[in-house]
Amino acid sequence: MTRLSVIAALFCALVQGPAFGLEIFACEPEWAALASEIGGDDVSVYSATTALQDVHRIQARPSLIARYRQAELLICTGAGLEAGWLPALEQKGNNPRIRPGMSGYLEAARLVPMLGVPESVDRAQGDVHPYGNPHIQTDPRNIAMVAATLVQRMAALDPDHAQAHRQRYAAFTDRWEAAMLRWEAAAAPLRGLAVVSAHQGWPYLYDWLGLREVASLEPKPGVPPSAGHLQQVLAGLETRPARFIVYAAYQDARPAQWLAERAGIPAIKLPFSVGGVPGADNLVALFELSLQRLLDAAGREP
């Protein structure tokens, strides 16, 4: 009888499925973190990428396809960021619940004002995004706008836990708004400072903090810097000096370090997303740590 009871219990567990109310597939770790803030223990969240990967260059591997098939809600940045691999998931995963146009499909970039929308698109210009720069997660104001729509979608798809989702969203919003006020006050010394970027992935961060990008280490978006281009950037800093160089945790640090040594300015590694550096393990910590690194660099003697 004991053996039969165990078998019956296992069968019931398989039939009932997981205890979670909603299976969420997030293309990037920032949206996985946001969904976890709102969903808590009532959701199962899977992040297709990490902050140590270049999201432009992900492969639609079998493990991603399997997770895609299970999902009831998909949240991705959109704006072409996942164009190299998400269409393959849609084709191979065959999950109509989370296809574009369905209630289970959410593009974060559609919910915020886009920066860097090009007047024309030419592949000769490099990796140009026709809908604007997709790296919206570097501005906390954008996180708040995405959260407002995400909670509505989660509540609609998961009515059994809708009230709990809304309560967690309200608590998160209170913490987030208080944190933004604190960050913006602390960031006052950064306003107007000139910076060099390893990649044009920071326009939203710069817009929020009032920083000015005077050069990029990439000759064209997505094109690795050559020795000749780095020399040009170094020469340009003589007339347009910068206070520091910013690069993301997933990027090769050597070009930024090369320029930093010769220009006599610090190179700052920022996490770019949740999990990019030790300690940046949630959304609040992501911005706390990023801002502190910028302030530390700004406080050094130029």
Image (spheres, rainbow, N blue to C red):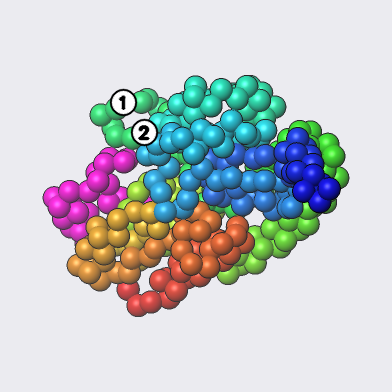
Badge 2 amino acid: Val
Q: Is residue 215 above or below residue 220?
A: below
Image location of residue 221, percent across then percent down: 32, 40
The front one of 13 and 1 is 1
Question: What residue does disc 1 label?
Answer: 122
Q: Is residue 170 toward the left or the right of residue 251 in the image?
A: right
Which of the image's four quarters has the C terminus?
bottom left
What mark, if any, has residue 256 been given in the picture? none
User: Would residue 227 be counted in the magenta stretch?
Assistant: yes
The answer to whether residue 123 is left or right of residue 38 is left
Q: Residue furthest left?
A: 228
Q: How would you rate the neighbour count of disc 1 (Cα within 10 Å): few for under 14, some for 14-19, many for 20 or more? A: few
The vertical placement of 23 against 203, above or below, is: above
Q: Position of residue 10 (x, y in %)?
A: 74, 44
In depth, the one of 186 and 62 nearer the eye is 62
Q: Quadrant of residue 234?
A: bottom left
Find the distance from the CA under tag 1 to the CA under tag 2. 8 Å
Q: Give the amino acid type for the residue marked by disc 1 in the picture.
A: Asp
Element under label 1? loop
User: What are the residue bounds of the magenta stretch?
Assistant: 213-239
| Residue drawn at point x = 77 percent, y = 48 percent | 3
Residue contact between numbered discs 1 and 2, judged by CB atoms under 8 Å: yes
Q: Secondary structure at mark 2?
A: loop
Q: Earlier in the sequence, mark 1 or mark 2?
A: 1
Q: Which residue is mark 2?
A: 128
